[in-house]
Amino acid sequence: MNQVKQRKASVILVAAGMGTRLGAGIPKALVEIAGKSLAEHAVDRILQVPGIREVVVVTPPADERLADALRGRPESVRTTPGGASRAESVRNGLAHVCADAELILVHDAARAFAPASLFQRVLDQLDMPGCAAAIPALAVSDTISVVAQDPAGGELVVQTPDRSTLRAVQTPQGFSAAALREAHAGLGSLSAEQLAAVTDDASIVRAAGGAVHVVAGDARALKVTHPDDLAAAEQLAAATTEAPHRNEPQDMLLPRVGTGIDIHAVSTDPKREMWLAGLYFPENVGLSGHSDGDAVAHAACDALFSASGIGDLGTHFGVDRPEFAGASGVSLLAEAARLVREAGFEIGNIAVQFVGRRPRFGARREEANRVLSAAAGAPVSITATTSDGLGYEGAGEGITAYATALVYERP
């Protein structure tokens, strides 16, 4: 049995918000999708996660309707009224979590369709040595700009961060119980500037000096915020309804598998930076190419395109596309994942193996897995091998990367 499943894990489900932007006229967690409230959908998915010992649902203050709706759930599901702010609601939930809890996940009822596998991914990360905080996140495919007010009216762009460094953060966010309790206890000592930067529990832990690790998010963890989101939530509910009786015939959801190969020579420019598997290796000369030469990320892109049947790397990122000159492999993988999802597919996983003498990769494998998984929004696993001195890889003249991707068509 996985060690993390033996640790005492609790979930705080924040369901106290009024959902003003949704405009439903009732607390957001009470809004019904396919005959059940968002909070009930969220609880039912949490109960599918092995190792979760209790669920503390933080309900709208002075409103018993959600507590009444959850009365038929197991005794491990309890409710408590929320507060005037999200941080206060989480603190109320913390007060009702069992004192011997070792891990605490904080989740939003607005992300009611986050699958059990996403919870497990966060729990697995918390089982890694030295990890006291972990959050799921998706790569950002759009260009994001920071703006300021123009004195003459309107707004001006003042900064455009590299989108390969940006992530759209989701919940559930997971913490060691001690780290989360300590961070919330220290909120009163934060300055006004620090408090302004606190938008979720991960930022509270970071403000307290804690390190927050990132795992791959999931597109199904959609946050219901605006009326348009309800249609997407209805689709998610329809896609995850209970299967028919096992004696009834069912359509089998068959995955599609694709392969990708990418080869790059070592650059003749000694100043060329080495980027591979989304990581920078300053001790090595980089690989030649139109973009950053990241053969691992490029092979992953090609495998995704192959699996979904929407072309190849040259189709989407060819040398005739000047906007991709020098582009990072991480940003290309994020864009490839977006195109695959736009074509109607979801990504199961991607596996990549590269062959080459350099760089030395073993010590950074898990870091690379995390970076590319976050970019793809799905699990990516990378392995490395040498060629026993044979061929151009063995001579240190280049690298070959082989990738396999699994995708499946969304219902």
Image (cartoon, rainbow, N blue to C red):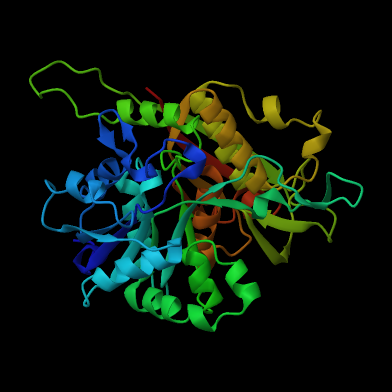
Tell me if residue 395 can be seen. Answer: no
Image coordinates of residue 337 in percent, x first then y, are 55, 36
In this view of the protein, which residue sits in the foreground, 72 or 368?
72
- 78 versus 38 height, above or below: below
Where is residue 373 drawn, in percent x and y?
Answer: 50, 49
Q: Where does the image place residue 359, in percent across and percent down from the top left?
A: 63, 61
Find residue 342 and report its image quarter: top right
Q: Please give left or right for residue 245 compared with residue 408 in the image.
A: left
Residue placed most toward the observer, 370 or 261: 370
Answer with left or right where residue 384 lies relative to residue 109. right
Residue 165 locus on image (x, y percent): 65, 55
**Is 373 displayed left or right of 10 in the figure?**
right
In-front residue for pair 292/22: 22
Q: Residue at x 51, y 36 (%)?
A: 226
Q: Above or below — where is 35 with respect to 400? A: above
Screen quadrant of the C terminus: top left
Q: Residue furthest left?
A: 247
The residue at 53%/32% (across/down) is 304
Looking at the image, the residue that sits furthest to the right is 152
- Direction from residue 1 to residue 87 in the image, left or right: right
The residue closer to the viewer here, 275 or 408, is 408
In the depicted structure, whether residue 373 falls above or below residue 11: above
Write down the quadrant of residue 86 in the picture.
bottom left
Against 409, residue 134 (above or below) is below
Which residue is situated farthest in the bottom direction here?
A: 189
Q: Quadrant of the N terminus?
A: bottom left
- Regarding residue 23, the answer to whether it shows in the image is yes
